[in-house]
Image (cartoon, grey):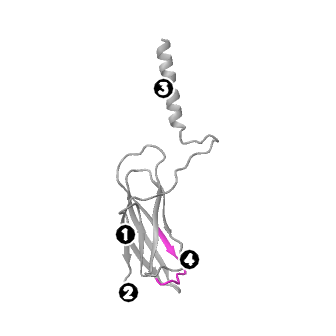
Amino acid sequence: MKMIVRTVALFVSVAALLALSHIAADGRVKVRPLERVPRVIAVEYAYEKCLPPNLVIHVTGEVPSVGWTDVQLIRRAYVKPPVDGIWEYDLVARPPSGRAKAKPTRVTAGDRWTGMKEIIAGVRIYGVDSGVKELRFDAGN
């Protein structure tokens, strides 16, 4: 009987540790940092008609499992505009903090560049490794 009680106590202790593993020693919840989305699937853009025009970018990516949150499209900051006119973005998201079902899942994010005064020939969206997608804009826009 003592063996069963000890086994149950050990099981409960391990389960509690696993359940609380996302909580730091000071009581705060650990938050995983943002990571680049592994795969960029599609990039779309549109100009909003105003002076100066606003550029709206919409990106679809794919992550390896369910549970990714806080998907963002972050425009890289430049001291001077890029020589080739291609502005770069990072598609990032927060991976799940625990186990997640391994199922490729689409995520989306966007950016509205208001009061855009720079000359923009296109955008390059970075995911992980070969997860880069470049879109050159039509010369008429």
Instruction: Name the amino acid, label 3.
Output: Phe
Q: CA distance from mark 1 to mark 4?
A: 23 Å
Q: Are marks 1 and 4 in contact (CB under 8 Å)?
A: no
Q: Which residue is mark 2?
A: 139
Name the front one of labels 3 and 4.
Answer: 4
Instruction: Name the amino acid, label 2.
Output: Ala
Q: Which residue is mark 3?
A: 11
Q: Is residue 55 above or below residue 51?
A: above
Q: Earlier in the sequence, mark 2 or mark 4?
A: 4
Q: CA distance from mark 3 to mark 4?
A: 56 Å
Name the front one of labels 1 and 3.
Answer: 1
Q: What residue span does the magenta drawing correspond to?
A: 110-119
Q: Earlier in the sequence, mark 1 or mark 3?
A: 3
Q: Earlier in the sequence, mark 2 or mark 1?
A: 1
Q: Are marks 3 and 2 in contact (CB under 8 Å)?
A: no
| Residue drawn 48% across the image and 26% down it | 11
Name the front one of labels 2 and 4.
Answer: 4
Q: Residue furthest top?
A: 1
Residue 139 is covered by the magenta coloring: no
Circle 4: element type: loop
Q: CA distance from mark 2 to mark 4?
A: 25 Å
Instruction: Name the amino acid, label 4.
Output: Val
Q: Earlier in the sequence, mark 1 or mark 4?
A: 4
Magenta: predominant secondary structure element?
loop
Where is residue 129, by image quadrant? bottom left
Where is residue 99, by image quadrant? top left
Circle 1: element type: strand
Circle 2: element type: loop
Q: Earlier in the sequence, mark 3 or mark 4?
A: 3
Q: Earlier in the sequence, mark 3 or mark 2?
A: 3
